[in-house]
């Protein structure tokens, strides 16, 4: 279903490239909860977090309520599915349509897509769970022995940004040095 990928960022690119076609989506996004600001007053997001299964807005609220909560024209209909690692909700796959609501077959397809993506994430290794795609690229570069300056040049970032990303990577993985990052499992 999703083409082979050598790292998390590549897997997400492949997935996002396919979502528009599979779901006739206007927009799509793969995101990780570590990067998510919170659920606020969004009942779809709260229900999704509680259920950990694919849901669309019409399963949670009526159309008038949805339009009031989410007035964006390109978010007329939203379908969201879970990314799981080690049995824990770590992220989501979301697609939107301007017109034409999602149906049961879309929910089933989203659950299949998310199961496949979750399996592929696990195959890429739990050691990078919870990292953003860019943090994954930085961590992989450290594991290849690159210095901050080299990573910055390779990824088109400033050295300061690389340092800040490494701080975030260390915090998320519970390590305190590059050596620990290299041996993290």
Image: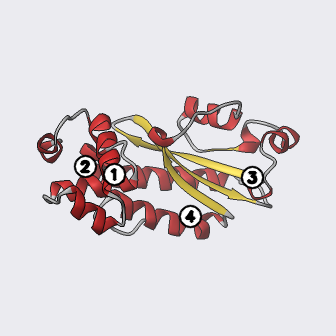
Nearer to us of marks 1 and 4 is: 1
Q: Is residue 1 visible?
A: no
Distance in Å between CA atoms under marks 2 and 1: 27 Å
Distance in Å between CA atoms under marks 1 and 3: 40 Å
Quarter of the image holding residue 28?
Answer: bottom right
The outermost residue toward the right is: 64
- Horizontally, is 41 left or right of 122 in the view? right
Residue that carries the numbered disc 4 in the rendered image: 19
Image point 50% across, 49% down: which residue? 31
Residue density around tag 4, few if under 14, some if 14–19, many if 20 or more, within 10 Å? many
Q: Which element is circle 1 on?
A: helix
Return the disc, 4 or 2, that comes first in the chain's sequence: 4
Return the disc, 1 or 4, that comes first in the chain's sequence: 4
Q: Which element is circle 3 on?
A: strand
Image point 37% across, 42% down: which residue? 130
Residue that carries the numbered disc 1 in the rendered image: 160
The circle on residue 48 is none
**Percent from the top left, x then y, of residue 138?**
29, 55
User: Is there CB contact under 8 Å for labels 3 and 4?
Assistant: no
Residue that carries the numbered disc 3 in the rendered image: 77
| Viewer-side residue, 116 vs 13 | 13
Distance in Å between CA atoms under marks 1 and 4: 34 Å
Residue that carries the numbered disc 2 in the rendered image: 125
Distance in Å between CA atoms under marks 2 and 3: 33 Å
Return the disc, 2 or 1, that comes first in the chain's sequence: 2
**Percent from the top left, x then y, of residue 89?**
45, 36
Distance in Å between CA atoms under marks 4 and 2: 23 Å
Q: Which element is circle 2 on?
A: loop
Residue density around tag 3, few if under 14, some if 14–19, many if 20 or more, within 10 Å? many
Residue density around tag 1, few if under 14, some if 14–19, many if 20 or more, within 10 Å? few
């Amino acid at each position: 279903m999703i083409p082979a990928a050598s790292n998390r960022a590549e897997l997400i690119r492949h997935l996002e490239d396919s979502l528009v076609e599979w779901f006739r989506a206007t927009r799509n996004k793969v995101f990780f909860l570590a990067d998510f600001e919170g659920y606020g007053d969004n009942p779809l997001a709260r229900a999704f977090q509680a259920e950990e299964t694919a849901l669309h807005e019409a399963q949670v609220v009526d159309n008038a309520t949805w339009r009031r909560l989410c007035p964006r024209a390109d978010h007329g209909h939203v379908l969201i599915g879970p990314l799981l690692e080690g049995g824990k909700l770590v992220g989501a796959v979301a697609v939107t349509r301007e017109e034409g609501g999602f149906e049961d077959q879309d929910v089933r397809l989203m659950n299949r897509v998310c199961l496949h993506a979750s399996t592929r994430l696990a195959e890429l290794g739990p050691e990078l769970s919870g990292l953003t795609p860019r943090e994954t690229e930085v961590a992989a570069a450290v594991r290849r022995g690159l210095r901050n300056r080299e990573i910055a040049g390779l990824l088109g970032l400033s050295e300061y940004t690389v340092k800040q990303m490494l701080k975030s990577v260390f915090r998320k993985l519970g390590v305190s040095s590059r050596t620990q990052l290299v041996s993290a499992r």
